[in-house]
Image (cartoon, grey):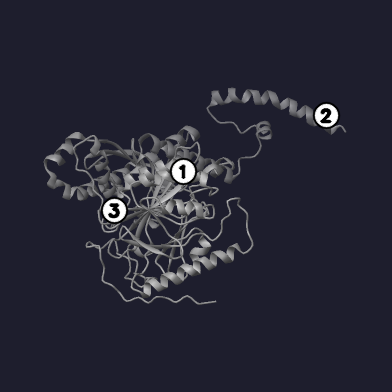
Amino acid sequence: MARVPTAVMNLIHRFPRLSQAPTRRRRSGTRPPAAPALALTSGARPRPWVRALGLVSVVLLGAWLGLLVVGNVRVPVGPMNTTMTLRPSFTGGTKINVSPLGALQLDSHIAPVRLDVNVDQLDPERSRALVDHPERLSGLQDEVTEDIARGTADLAVRSCVAVVTGAATLGLLVYRRPRRALAAGGLALGLLAASGGTAYTTWNPDSVLEPKFSGLLSSAPSLVGDARSIVTEFDVYQQELARLVTNVTKLYDATSTLPVYQPDPTTIRVLHVSDIHLNPASWKIIASLVEQYRVDVIVDSGDTMDHGTAAENGFLDPIEDLGAPYVWVRGNHDSLVTQRYLDRMRNVHVLDDGRARTIAGLRFAGIGDPQFTPDRTQRTGAEQSQELAGARLASAMRDQKRAGNPVDVAVVHEPSAAREVDGTVPLVLSGHLHREDTEVMRYGTRLRVEGSTGGSGLRAIEGKYPDPIETSILYFDRDTKRLQAWDSIELGGLGLTTAEVSRHLPEENQPGADTSPSPSGSSPGTSPGSPSGTVPSTPSATPSRPRS
């Protein structure tokens, strides 16, 4: 028991010596040993993984600040002034901001860095030079390619300097040791090099074939060119980006004297709408798209109405003034009363019982929905009735093919009916699901399911979130009648003001893809890479669908 007070007294007697240690160090200039009491209060040194985590945090924050402050370059690209920047990102990709028109997003690579290209302004002097010397337009794409190559090289150098400087500076402020600061800068440079390597290995030069538009650019799909020439003009990523930037100049023709961009007049454009469900705003949207895209024909795959009563028929009157022929099939919310009303309207073509019509150079055939369920009930045998209707349509199209009049596009309402025509037609359009989808079925027929062009109509207020308004523009080659590309258009639902357009190409039209046999027995689709718009015909056999 006597040892306890003795140990306490010894500890107390040590405090005066500790308090005198700084005085002795100042006098002698030597560093005293660490105080045991301080070791007891501060604990052990941080674990290695804690120090490593702290260093990584400093490196990432410093590199980000460096990129934010000095990691951008101003580059004149053709007649425009642009700013290129690298930004941290979880998804990577490339974003081209065309203020005030909107932006384009490209899935160009997968890496923790994103390339931002801001189109700041159109230089009036360089634009005037193009007008005075129109022969320079032919070499504008090569000039833009060189400008972008030079700009990306400058951006790479500046980004390296930015991340090293930012990480080293922040490391010096945090650790106050030059070696730690240099280590932070070196680690930042290594991370940037690793990100660049990842971007290089995942680089997708064809990403510009399926861009996503936002803002006012959603109404200018011709920015990336027409479906016939989209592949030939986008061979490598630099040329693709050059083409985008070149065509951006043409969007400014409203405020300058640059030549107007004209899309290919030979492409057949089809506007696919579905499931309007009595939304009066749909007619204004459709009319705007018809004018904006120069649509040749509108295809409605049903459920234009909600209850199919005669009292609703007046809702259909604006169809006559939409500016394009209107092809329609009956949905499960459309009655025969609705069908007869539309059949009497000018410029409307009702498809039913497998009958075919040739409109705007394309041959359409369709069948109305065998169900009429405006109260949303599920009747017994509904699936079987859809399959039977699809089989009737397939049989009618086989008869027309044998007669020498093959159908180019089939139209039904429900996808379950559409699956029955697999192998008898190149493309079948449907709706009903209120969400967009596309697939190539087992025997080669492509199924395109459209979303709700009416944002599900009055039902938009039933759910927690409003349904978007969805539609699409389909591009067909006038010679082969094959689908070349399509633009998926999505507008914000009730109370929302968003817009997005994304371009898609069928697999057979992707660069380097082989042509596949045609389900209809016609020649394969025209490759957009063919300057003349045609390719040599290859023999194709029509796969026969097994009968149950």
Q: Position of residue 254 (x, y in %)?
A: 24, 36
Seen at 36% across and 50% down, the residue is 346
Give the quadrant of the N terminus: top right
Residue 73 position (above or below residue 528): above
Q: Nearer the viewer, residue 213 or 392?
A: 392
Res. 322 image quadrant:
top left
Say which residue label 3 marks.
Answer: 226
Q: Secondary structure at mark 2?
A: helix
Say which residue label 1 marks.
Answer: 315
Q: Position of residue 539 (x, y in %)?
A: 32, 76
Say which residue label 2 marks.
Answer: 5
Spatial distance from mark 3 to mark 1, Cα to Cα?
Answer: 34 Å
User: Which sits earlier in the primary sequence, circle 1 or circle 2?
Assistant: 2
Spatial distance from mark 3 to mark 2, Cα to Cα?
Answer: 94 Å
Give the foreground label among 1 and 2. 1
User: Which sits earlier in the primary sequence, circle 3 or circle 2?
Assistant: 2
Amino acid of disc 2: Pro
Seen at 45% across and 37% down, the residue is 497
Neighbor class of circle 3 (other Cα within 10 Å; few <14, some 14-19, many 20+) is many
Q: Are marks 3 and 2 in contact (CB under 8 Å)?
A: no
Residue 19 position (above or below residue 329): above
Residue 172 position (above or below residue 17): below
Q: Secondary structure at mark 3?
A: loop
Q: Nearer the viewer, residue 138 or 478?
A: 478
Q: Secondary structure at mark 1?
A: helix
Give the quadrant of the C terminus: bottom right
Res. 26 image quadrant:
top right
Q: Position of residue 177 (x, y in %)?
A: 47, 36
Neighbor class of circle 1 (other Cα within 10 Å; few <14, some 14-19, many 20+) is some
Query: Is 442 on the left or on the right of 511, as rendered?
Result: right
